[in-house]
Image (cartoon, rainbow, N blue to C red):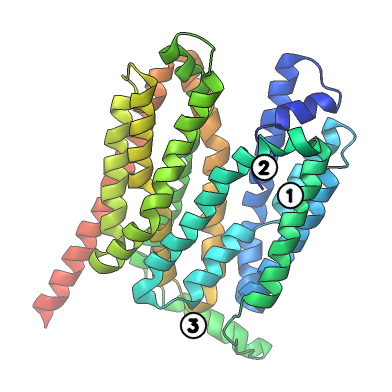
Amino acid sequence: MTLLLPFLPLYIEQLGVTNHAAIVQWSGIAYGATFLSAALVAPLWGRLADRYGCKVNLIRASLGMVVAMSLIGLSQNVWELVALRLFVGLAGGYTSGSYVIVAAQTPKDRSAWALGVLSSGIMAGNLLGPLLGGVLPQWLGMRMTFFAASGFILLNFIATTTLIHEAPRQAPDGKGKRGNAQHGAGTVGIGERKLVLAMFVTAALLMIANMSIEPIITVYVQQLLGSVKSVTWFAGLAMSAAALGSIVSSSTLGKIADRIGRLNVIVASLGVAGLLLIPQAFVTHVWQLIGLRFLMGLALGGILPCVTAVIRHNVPDGAVGRALGYSTSSQYAGQVLGPLFGGVIGGHVGMRYVFLMTALLLVASALCNAWFVSGAARTSLKAQTSR
């Protein structure tokens, strides 16, 4: 799904847009369209997964993406491209569905580790996709690259259908469903609701922090290099460094979270990542930026698995898909808002301030989550005292 990122502006130019500013503008619209539509329907797919099963939802998503990617390869103008990118968001949702099925079927004491392994796989795809997207169009042509991507997703559809096994679901009658739903909703206390809402906000802020750097990284690297030579290569390394760090650390941080507490890992990871953003604003060589981005990726790798695990443990079993659907919507919202935030701050205040403002967001999020940790500790101490 990330194959198209390197050549999306070139594809838009091939579709008849010739003005440079218009190409940049349409690239942003086409790229963000998928996140926008996906954010709107993610809770719906999560609710359907709760009712009909996670595997059915994954099959639907993979088949929908097969169709969508093929149609993008047949686009005749930029309006069709944007409409089909919207369709990708509406029809997709495989990543969020995979989080739901792993969270629902993994033993709770190992859920953060399992979600960390899943996150590593997702980040590996996000890292390798643009690299392949930079090579395949030269061999196959841009339109054929979309059909090749559709073929890859077709293999995913076949694997999902034949290899994934979901635990049997009890199918009560309509009255039972309603009763269970009411009972499930009643078992969630005010504290749990606040914690789940805090996880939604944390996920959104994490995506804003990740994506706010994207619009400025190439220009920032150019300033560090002092020339345009090899800018794209070093900018790509800087972008990939954080993803690589997350791949390395996700499963390990998940395993640690299962032992010492997921909120503790979230607080520490957000705080460390926020502090690592500060020196990125003052680097003088590009290798310093790449190294700091890798370290920041190491810190951030365990956050989303831990956020997902916390949500999983604080909602009823029958509402896991719906809750994780809202979490996915908040992440997509962050992916839409992040580039806007980075572009506005970088364009009007200065690029170094993007790093500093993003650091402030992460540290503030860490402090808010620390408040929940201290509240949980106070509740536990009060319970022990009452005994």
In 3D space, how far apart are the residues under numbered discs 1 and 2 (Cα atoms)?
7 Å
Q: Is residue 27 left or right of residue 235?
A: right
Q: Are marks 3 and 1 in contact (CB under 8 Å)?
A: no
The disc label shown at residue 183, or none: 3
The disc label shown at residue 3, or none: 2
In 3D space, how far apart are the residues under numbered discs 2 and 3 (Cα atoms)?
44 Å
Q: Which residue is at a point 70% across and 74% down the rendered structure image?
A: 161
In 3D space, how far apart are the residues under numbered discs 3 and 1 (Cα atoms)?
44 Å
Residue 62: quadrant of the picture: bottom right
Q: Which residue is at a point 74% across and 45% down the rendered structure image?
A: 86
Q: Is residue 330 visible?
A: no
Residue at disc 1, secondary structure:
helix
The answer to whether 322 is drawn above or below residue 174 in the figure is above
Q: Is residue 201 visible?
A: yes
The disc label shown at residue 240, or none: none
Residue at disc 3, secondary structure:
helix
Q: Which residue is at a point 51% across and 57% down the rendered structure image?
A: 121
Q: Amino acid at mark 1?
A: Ala
Q: Amino acid at mark 2?
A: Leu
User: Residue 290 or 296: which is nearer the viewer?
Assistant: 290
Residue at the limit of the structure toward the front, as seen here: 139
Mark nearer the N terminus (1 vs 2): 2
The answer to whether 105 is drawn above or below residue 76 in the figure is below
Residue 229: quadrant of the picture: top right
Q: Position of residue 42 (x, y in %)?
A: 62, 57
Q: Position of residue 152 (x, y in %)?
A: 72, 56
The disc label shown at residue 149, or none: 1
Residue at disc 2, secondary structure:
loop
